[in-house]
Amino acid sequence: TEPQTTDPIGSETPKSEKTDKTKIEIRLKANGNATNYMKKKKWAVDPDKKISSIMEFVKKNVMKGEVEKSAFLYVNQSFAPAPDQIVKNLYECYGTDGKLVLHYCKTQAWG
């Protein structure tokens, strides 16, 4: 099996194993003027994590080297969730195909 690395939002989802049922799979996708530095796009996240922790992860790890360190997250390319929103709540309402898709960019894009 592939080793899993831990980080502020969870762990990388290995291709050879199914996601732990206690975690929620999220996909981070670059949009607009955000540069995509990530090799992995799937992450297994604790359902009780706040969106603010995912925003911080994107700022620190995804937009590394960027002069502007602002990050905006959007659910399904439609609206920006509140920073104190819980991942589980968003997944239950907007998750599709067993995952929650979050798009990120450096400037406001939708909603």
Image (cartoon, rainbow, N blue to C red):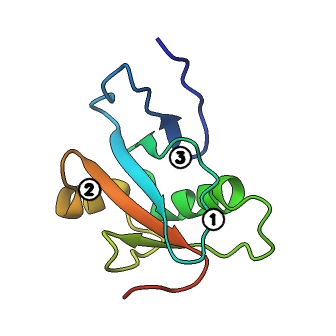
Where is residue 54? Give x, y as percent.
53, 57
Question: Could you give the CA–CA distance between mark 3 and mark 2, rounded to whole angstroms?
Answer: 15 Å
What residue type is disc 2 on?
A: Tyr
What residue type is disc 3 on?
A: Ile
Name the mark nearer the viewer: 1 or 3. Answer: 1
53 vs 111, nearest the viewer: 111
Helix, strand or loop under label 1: loop
Q: Residues within 10 Å of mark 1 (few under 14, many from 20)?
A: some
**Mark found first going from the N terminus, 2 or 1:** 1
What residue type is disc 1 on?
A: Thr
Where is residue 69? Give x, y as percent.
72, 72
Identify residue for label 2: 91
Question: Could you give the CA–CA distance between mark 1 and mark 3, rounded to whole angstroms?
Answer: 20 Å
Q: Is residue 54 above or below residue 44?
A: below
Give me the residue at 53% from left, 64% from top.
Answer: 52
CB contact under 8 Å: marks 2 and 1 = no
Q: Which mark is residue 9?
A: 3
Q: Which mark is residue 35?
A: 1
Give me the residue at 68% from left, 52% from top.
Answer: 61
Helix, strand or loop under label 2: helix
Does residue 48 appear anywhere in the picture?
A: no
Where is residue 5? Give x, y as percent.
59, 28
Q: Give the left or right position of residue 79, taking residue 37 as reference.
A: left
Give me the residue at 81% from left, 73% from top.
Answer: 67
**Mark found first going from the N terminus, 1 or 3:** 3
